[in-house]
Image (cartoon, grey):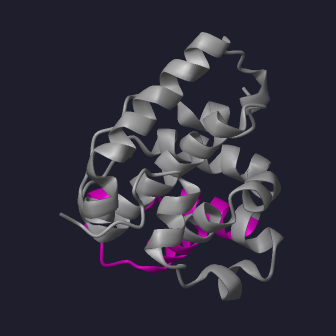
Amino acid sequence: MKSEDVKLTNEEKSMIITEVNKVLNSGFRILGFDGGMAFPQYPYYLYFGDSDKELRRYSVSIFTIWLGYWNSGCSFRFTKQSELYKYIKALVEQQEEIEKDFPVVFNYLVSFLIELTENYDYAEETRMKPYIVEIVHKDFLGKKSYYREKYRYRINFIEFLKELKIQDYDKPYD
């Protein structure tokens, strides 16, 4: 099922956005990718191509944050790599729009995928399966030759928070 095939009511979209926004604003700016905050369980990959920009922003951001948690060793969200496969396939379908609409989030997403597919220091049970690594390299990173160079290093975390519309993203920690 393609992401644009999913039809949510405005109320459902608003509920998802509100729930995710609440979690993001309850400490992510302080904890970052080491916090392992629990987000509401939705099939976010289905919303990567949604017409509602805020729903797309939060859906792609949650996937990026989950990859960041995995990369930092904080938590491993994808115990079923078949679920990770769905996220990667949706990303491949929507990568140009995501890159255009959310350039900082996209920078983090690509950077994490590069590190997660090139780093084999992860325990066997948390290492990406070879078929997923192949899809990331061939269908995602391979489509745009500049991805590896441009997105290998992440932009300032404050810019990431700003693009996620985190409240008080630039305030000192209390």
**Residue 79 appears in view:** no
- Vertical position of residue 5 compared to residue 141: above or below: above
Let me know if residue 122 is in the magenta part: yes
The answer to whether residue 33 is left or right of residue 162 is left
Let me know if residue 86 is in the magenta part: no
The answer to whether residue 32 is left or right of residue 91 is left
Percent from the top left, x then y, of residue 74? 23, 61
Residue visible at 28% across and 44% down in the picture: 26
On-image quarter of the C terminus: bottom left
Percent from the top left, x then y, of residue 158? 46, 71
- Vertical position of residue 31 compared to residue 58: above or below: below
- Vertical position of residue 47 compared to residue 87: above or below: above
Percent from the top left, x then y, of residue 98? 73, 54
Between 17 and 133, which is closer to the camera in this rendering?
17
Tally the numbered discs: 0
Percent from the top left, x then y, of residue 34? 25, 64
Q: Which residues are magenta?
A: 110-138
State which quadrant residue 30 falls in: bottom left
Give the farthest residue toward the left: 174
Residue visible at 66% across and 60% down in the picture: 135
